[in-house]
Image (cartoon, rainbow, N blue to C red):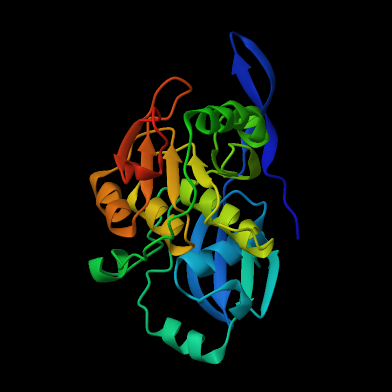
Amino acid sequence: MTRAAHSSLPVWREGSVGPDAVAEEVPVALRYNGEPHVVMMCTPEDLEDFAHGFSVTEDIVTGIGDIQSIRVCQAADDQGCVIDIGIPAAQAARLAGRQRNLQGRTSCGLCGSADTGAAIRPVRRVPAGDGLTPAALRRALGMLHKQQPLNAATGATHAAAWATPEGLIVATREDIGRHNALDKLIGHLLRTESDLSRGFLLITSRASYEMVHKAASVGMPTVVAISAPTALAVRVAQEAGITLIGFARADRHVVYTCPGRLTRGAA
């Protein structure tokens, strides 16, 4: 099942009417072994990547090898999409013990967690990974704009990109939700068996807790954000051993944690 990621709608500019590209936002329901788990507001593209990434970063499965089947279909009311995901019975039973409110807003990466204990989870340590040079960071930042066709058309989406240690962007995903874009990217990278210890994550949003936690869950050693981090994100990055960089620009950036991965002159 496919749906357009944006629609052409009439808008008024300085007294004249003309078409404009507007990003789509639809409810996407995730069901595991037939049981509803959560509804997220998403851009309706790359939904299989999203299902894979979300399932891993939310610790529903231990790896994408545990995902037995995925089927994306139109919701019965035609207002959104349903993703049916098949997982082993033991993991489905463990998931059934989680209490959810079955709604996740576009801006909320905690996905309907019912209490603070479920929302703030232990974080994994990441591998040492590769170093990062100023030249590699500048190269990736220079490539990023051309990797965002949906945002270029609509101005409404975030992007998450994966770059090689040399700063070449090899994969990008977009979504109206920053955490959705990251889950889509992670799902794609896991499905293509990419080495997530070699390279760095570049995101167009702030580096909030859930963005850093999702990166740590799959072993990404460096997170570079165009905007600022939160204090909780900084503490989680330090605990995970992630190099967290914010306010990334071609001529400057701020390093918040683990500066040892940066080569001399990068900080």
Measured along the vertical axis of the image, is residue 258 above or below residue 100?
Answer: above
Which residue does the image show at 33% across and 36% down from the upper left? 255
Measured along the vertical axis of the image, is residue 262 above or below residue 217?
Answer: above
Residue 159: x and y in percent read: 55, 41
Q: Looking at the image, can residue 236 be seen?
A: yes
Measured along the vertical axis of the image, is residue 54 above or below residue 252?
Answer: below
Which residue does the image show at 59% across and 32% down from the upper left? 144
The one of 231 and 8 positioned closer to us in this rendering: 231
Residue 15: x and y in percent read: 61, 9
The one of 125 and 26 positioned closer to us in this rendering: 125
Q: How many marks?
A: 0
Horizontal side, residue 23 vs residue 177: left or right: right
Q: Quadrant of the N terminus?
A: bottom right
Horizontal side, residue 30 vs residue 95: left or right: right
Residue 30: x and y in percent read: 55, 69
Residue 121: quarter of image: bottom left
Q: Quadrant of the C terminus?
A: top left
Which residue does the image show at 40% across and 30% down from the upper left? 266
Q: Looking at the image, can residue 207 be seen?
A: no
Residue 146: quarter of image: top right
The one of 22 and 184 positioned closer to us in this rendering: 184
Residue 249: x and y in percent read: 45, 25
